[in-house]
Amino acid sequence: MGSKVYFIEASVDDGHNVISEKARKVFKAGGFADCFSENDFTAVKVHVGEDGNNTYIKAPYIKGLVDELVGLKTKPFVTDTTTLYVGHRHNAVDHTILAAKHGFSVDGLGIPFVAPDGLFGTSETAVKINGQINKKEVYIANDIIKSQSILSVAHVTGHVAAGLGATLKTLGMGCASKKGKMKQHAALTLNISDDCTRCGVCYDHCPADAITIDDVKAHINQDKCIGCAECMAMCRFGAVTCNWGLETDVLQKSIAEHALGTLKGKEKKTTFFNFMLSVTKDCDCFDTPNMRTIVEDIGIIASTDPVAVDKAALDMVENTSGKKLAELLGNYELDTSCQIAHGESIGLGSSIYELVEIN
Ligand code: SF4
Ligand code: SF4
């Protein structure tokens, strides 16, 4: 038997309104209204799409879901955390402007975009967990922890290091503060580029005394750095850069453990949607238009089990394409099941599921 995963066929060719109504149909068929109560602050976790990207899950696709939450008299808000990399989502101001440009706003959806990790991505709650990688705590955006319920909307894509980008990655990486993101990229190191103006802000904020400034620019002492990302968060010149190492095992397990932190205390208060439309090789953080897809459009699935909904997404991508995800991503070494297996082992959910098809 396993956890129920509700599925409806859909394609971007259906158009915004039909996709929205199909998602709403899944919401109703799954009885997901039971997860939300009147006056809940409900975090509708989305990815607004990097500037230039045009394959992200569009705001109108989720209008029906938002209307359902409004009808239940919750206080929903669309939300996403700031990024480690320097782009249009690096701080709350730029992120909110981009969200509005892409329709994730009061004008577009009737509900506001709220940056849950504050202006610089440092507003966080340390959530105690007993994980394999994160033995004591993980760092999650404050306002996601403070909200009473979560409706997660993930775009299923490939990912260069994590293999699958879907619900677990949305909850783990996508809900973490900058420090939480740094912890997930354990093998990642920060460096300071020639864009440094020697303003000294990073020096003032570094809690580990790891930054020095010479006549040319600031430098990070890697032996002292604790990876808190404070310097990256505070630098207004985008001079703090990082190398994206492919520490895939540690990364995937840490993603699952951060997802556990995100959901802690919200039992029976969460619903997870995976949109398998425009399933691109890389995630929506890329600013590239018309990215290559790895499988034809499949549809929308949803569940109250984050592991089951990701296992179903992985299976449906592989069954539809006739290829393993690692092969679709061109990296035969990549273990694309690690995130799901670790999520199951730490009690996030079950990889055994029953697919309920909706017509
Ligand atoms: S905050 Fe940025 S620009 Fe200022 S010293 Fe540090 S790295 Fe250089
Ligand atoms: S990541 Fe944190 S500890 Fe490392 S240099 Fe930046 S501010 Fe200092």
Image: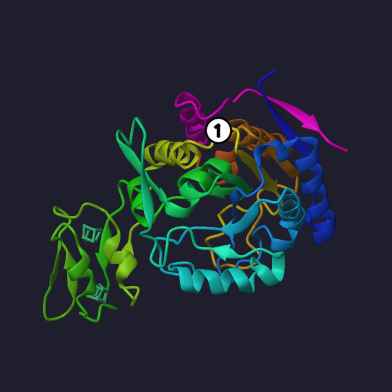
Give residue 76's position: percent from left, percent from top.
63, 55
Quarter occupied by the C terminus = top right
Give residue 332's position: percent from left, percent from top.
50, 38
Q: Which residue is mark 1?
A: 267
Which of the 4 quarters of the picture holds residue 192? bottom left
Q: Nearer the viewer, residue 323 or 173?
A: 173
- The reply to whether residue 330 is visible in this rendering is no
Q: Is residue 49 left or right of residue 17?
A: left
Give residue 185's position: percent from left, percent from top.
35, 48
65 vs 5: above or below = below
Please report the residue visible at 58 percent of the width from the left and 25 percent of the height from the top.
Answer: 350
Please report the residue visible at 23 percent of the width from the left and 74 percent of the height from the top.
Answer: 201
**Quick one: SS at disc 1?**
loop
Chosen colour scheme? rainbow
Magenta-span inclusion, residue 338: yes
Q: Nearer the viewer, residue 37 or 8?
A: 37
* Three-letter amino acid code at the position of disc 1: Glu
27 vs 117: above or below = above
Q: Is residue 19 left or right of residue 156?
A: right
326 vs 3: above or below = below
Q: Which residues are magenta?
A: 336-359
Please report the residue visible at 43 percent of the width from the left and 68 percent of the height from the top.
Answer: 91
Give residue 324's position: percent from left, percent from top.
61, 36
Magenta-span inclusion, residue 99: no
- The reply to whether residue 280 is visible in this rendering is yes
Q: Is mark 1 within 8 Å of ligand 2?
A: no
Q: Nearer the viewer, residue 199 or 67?
A: 67
